[in-house]
Amino acid sequence: MRGRLFEIRRPFPLMGHIAFGIIDRGYNILQVRVSSLCPLSCPFCSVDAGPITRRRRDFILTDPEWLAEWLKRACRYKGRVHVLFDAAGEPLTNPLLPDFVSEVKGTGLALSIAVETRLYPTDREMLLRLVESGVNRFNISIDTLNPEKARWLSGSNAYNLDNVLDLTLFLNKELGVDVHITPLWIPGVNDGDIEEIIRWVQSVGIGGKVPPLGIQKYVEHRHGRKIPGVKEWSWSLFYRRLRELEEKYNIRLVLRPEDYGLEVAPRALCPYRRGSTVKLYVIGEAWLPNEYLAVTTGYDRAVTLISKSVSLSTRDIITARITSDRDGILLARPV
């Protein structure tokens, strides 16, 4: 994979960056990202992950106890939360994932623990370890039941759909873990596949505490990959198509936050706001050209520092202005 792998460990702050650590979007759930690596090169990837990435750097967390400490900090304001291990990549690329899950469970602050994954690469042994560590649900992305199309949509000839389906049933039927199938609906590409997936889910009886299917809308992202010729649907058209399939197959497809046990909750306090001026340590290159990974001098937040006119170096101390603080993800520019 192009770019260098940056290990995140104590004392590096685990809030403030979109690629790693903890993200709070104002509900009783925290997203936890322990790896931005991915073995696949999906042609629709919203974060341009995988072997063909244009990123300059990827990130991986290597200190499970440190993550637990940051979870405790966030929960001072939120109380107990659902925890979702997702990624700007594939969470299962971090071999310490079971240890992270175990540490999160050990805090006593997790209402539930879910992992969002394509189940590649993994095996039964790893999945069993994750369940024993505390995972309650797997959100599994399966976009087609056609093996050839699955290899194309994953961007990898090594992707084994039959193995993914076998592991899915192993989780739900043998281990008794909740499984939530989350296909991406790509207009004109897998329309028929979506219906086939619905029929498969119904025939094998996939399920749990949440509805068995959570169909995702294809959305083009500025820095993500796009499939040529695909026209993105409006949200109104997307929901209309879902309702048509609901009626056809007698299954719930239009879901709400409460279906996942989610509700609005206080946000973890972010000490920095848009427009404020801060001093930052430059750590090194970040994902994109002209982006740098930085931390506040108090080591309480990670920051993406954007500098197009001035080239920065590791260990530089920069005065910068916060230009975005949405969901506690901090972007800044030198002043």
Image (cartoon, grey):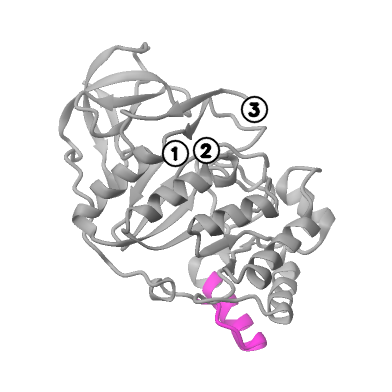
Return the residue found at the far right.
148
| Residue at 48% across, 29% down | 287
Q: Which residue is mark 2?
A: 36
Q: Which of the pair 192/126 is nearer the observer?
A: 126
**Among the two numbered marks 3 and 2 on one chain, the one whose residue lies closer to the N terminus:** 3
Question: Which of the marked residues, 3 or 1, is nearer the chain's N terminus?
Answer: 3
Residue 146, image x, y percentages: 81, 61
Quarter of the picture holding the N terminus: top right
x and y percent of residue 318 in the render?
24, 17
Q: Mark 1 and mark 2 in contact (Cβ < 8 Å)?
A: yes
Q: Main secondary structure of the magenta part?
A: helix
Q: Which mark is residue 19?
A: 1
Can you identify the residue that label 3 sits on?
A: 1
**Numbered marks: total:** 3
Q: Residues within 10 Å of mark 2 (few under 14, many from 20)?
A: many
Amino acid at circle 2: Ser
